[in-house]
Image: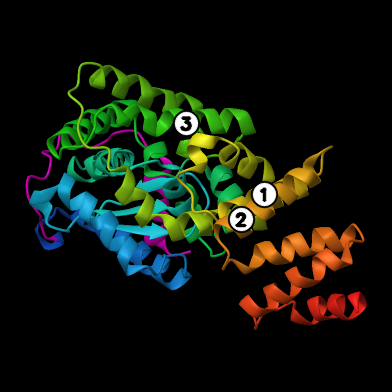
Amino acid sequence: MSPRLLGLLALILGATAVADEVVPWAYPVSAVSLEREEKNLWAEAEEFDKALERSGKLRKDPALNGYLQGVMDKLYPEFGGKVRVRALDSNQLNAFALPNGSVYINTGLLARLQNEAQLATVLAHEGAHFVHRHSYQQIENAKNMTVVALVVGMAGVPIVGSVVALSSMSGFSREHESEADHVGYRRLVAAGYSAREAPKTFEHLIAEIKALDINEPFFFASHPKLQDRVDILGELAKDAVNGEAGHEPYVMAMRDVRLFALQEDLDAYRYKQLILVLSDSERRREYPPEASFFLGEAYRLRNQEGDIDLAKREYTLSIELAPGFASAYRALGLLHYKRGEKKLSTPLFKRYLELAPAAPDREYVESYLKENG
């Protein structure tokens, strides 16, 4: 682990403010104009940016990243793309900002947000951490290496896993978090977004975290910090004139992200999370029709009384709503096959192979068909 990355990790893990009052950025600045200490922070951040690129965790979706950048530029127009946003392929409910203006937001969080105004709430907060130079004000050596040991490698790469898992928000003082809330709120309103969506950004995350008893060292799994966001933003927004929520653009932009997040949860056997989100009729409407397949798989994995029938219902619904989605045919075919209903499984297996001719389990499915005669 390089000294520079250790320095950045210390920064993000949290610290006591040691810098004097610093003036927020009013316009883009160059690293060469910075004092030595802050210049070193930027250099560390740039090294981490490169490490993330090498890790393969950056989502390679120009349209998505362009959409995210467009929202940030709307919030911080005077910085003209210098506060750079990118999506990370990670199912943790998290986002973080680096000292050089790089902002990362995880696909897990993007999948849970409901509209563009809620996205803007998160991005405006993270942008405020950069513009108000909170990192520079909180320089100190790493002091919680037990947390580091717990999360190193979580994203599959050394050191990158640590920082991906930890939010910049978790490392800032309560004073700086409050400042970012207030600054971000003003940016949100100035950009024309609905202020009433700001507290909602975190309310349903709190409900999910409590229902699933999530206990992880991340900002978005920290009940008190989430509640702080809700309390502050709720108070700010109580008399606000409503603006644009941006529901439809957000749903369209997040289609592939939401399917990716569902697959990530399924692969990790987080069926409780899938059931909690997708069995809510209001939330379900935000997801593509293929989501029915994932809910069916979640019921199958839970396997309580009546769950197999619920799974069958969801597989069938997925086929009706998304007839080109191969996985639902396979799942429903296997369900019938295991029940001995081979006549029902045969056309489903055949359709699965038609839609997915290069399926990795093709030989197995063909063996089922031969057995069916």
Query: Mark 1: which amino acid?
Result: Glu
- Can you give x and y, in whole percent of width and height, for residue 133 in the image? 21, 43
Q: Which residue is mark 1?
A: 314
Taking the image as shown, residue 32 lies to the left or right of residue 332, namely left
Q: Amino acid at mark 3?
A: His
Q: Start and end of the magenta stretch?
A: 1-30
Per the image, label 3 sits on a secondary structure element best described as helix
Q: Is residue 9 magenta?
A: yes
Residue 300 visible at all: yes
- The location of residue 249, given as percent across then percent down, is 30, 51
Q: Position of residue 290 (x, y in %)?
A: 56, 57
Q: Is residue 217 left or right of residue 51?
A: right
Which comes sooner in the sequence, label 3 or label 2? Answer: 3
Residue at mark 1 to residue at mark 2: CA–CA distance: 6 Å
Residue that carries the numbered disc 2 in the rendered image: 318
Residue located at (46% from left, 65% from top) = 57
Circle 3 is placed at which residue position? 204
SS for dot 1:
helix
Q: Are marks 3 and 1 in contact (CB under 8 Å)?
A: no
> What secondary structure is the stretch in magenta mostly built from?
loop
Residue 213: image quadrant is: top right
Q: Nearer the viewer, mark 3 or mark 2?
A: 2
Q: Is residue 209 above or below residue 249?
A: above
User: Mark 2 and mark 1 in contact (Cβ < 8 Å)?
Assistant: yes
